[in-house]
Amino acid sequence: MELFGLAIPAGIAVFLLLCIVVMYNGLIRIRNHCDEAWADVETELKRRYNLIPNLVNTVKGYAAHERELLDQVVRLREECARNWGTPGQQVDSEQRFQAALHGLLVRVENYPALKASSNFLALQEELANTENRIQAALRFYNGNIRDNNNRVQTFPSAIIAGMFGFKEREYFKLDDPAMAALPAVAL
């Protein structure tokens, strides 16, 4: 009878320990998914940064008087390429870079010969593909961040997260400069 009396508390302890291990391992997995997703975002951002010098050099030949905007794009590209901190630390420079790049692409519309250049068209297409890949990587990253934050904030995994130092993570969200530039519609 005494053996049966010890088996129940031992079974409960083993069950609780098993729950803790499962929750801890789940937190480790989601942390690793977040790190992997962020590495994917950084890869796509670097890809964009590598395209910019070619794009700027192509535009320079056609639009010499756009020098200030071109210099701004190059300066912001270099700033972003050096800034590999947390998502929150990167979002400001990325916002400014994205807006300057959008401004450059809008101004290109004034140069029909440039728009017809096969080199420029190839670069523009590659940049568009890269922007799509960045958006896909950001959606994947932010989805993993949501999952991480849900686990860190909800009971009972919040207890395990607190015990082992798991923290909420930052989302990375860039505003779409094309949406910001939409004209207001008056009725």
Image (tube, grey):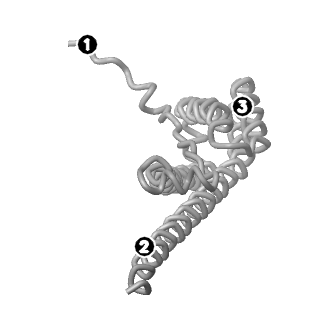
**Horizontal side of residue 70 vs 155, given as left or right:** right
The percent coordinates of residue 162 (x first, y second) are 57, 50
Q: Which mark is residue 70?
A: 3
The percent coordinates of residue 27 (x first, y second) are 54, 61
Type of the residue with mark 2: Ile
Task: In the rendered view, tell whether residue 29 sits above or below residue 117.
Answer: below
Q: Nearer the viewer, mark 3 or mark 1?
A: 1
Residue that extends furthest to the top in the rendered view of this protein = 187
- Judge the density around disc 3: few (<14), some (14-19), many (≥20) Cα neighbours within 10 Å: many
Residue positioned 54% across, 37% down in the render: 112
What residue is shown with label 1?
186
Residue positioned 79% across, 42% down in the render: 82
The percent coordinates of residue 183 (x first, y second) are 37, 20
Type of the residue with mark 3: Leu
Task: In the rendered view, tell whether residue 185 sits above or below residue 162.
Answer: above
Task: In the rendered view, tell whether residue 3 sits above or below residue 86.
Answer: below
Type of the residue with mark 1: Ala
Residue positioned 61% across, 59% down in the render: 40
Residue 57 appearing in the image: no
User: Which of these two is toward me, 114 or 149?
Assistant: 149
Which is nearer the N-term, disc 2 or disc 1?
2
Mark 3 and mark 2: Cα distance apart in space:
67 Å
Mark 3 and mark 1: Cα distance apart in space:
34 Å
Residue 99 appearing in the image: yes
Element marked by disc 1: loop
* Contact (Cβ within 8 Å) of mark 3 with mark 1: no
* Contact (Cβ within 8 Å) of mark 2 with mark 1: no
Q: Which mark is residue 12?
A: 2
Q: Nearer the viewer, mark 2 or mark 1?
A: 2
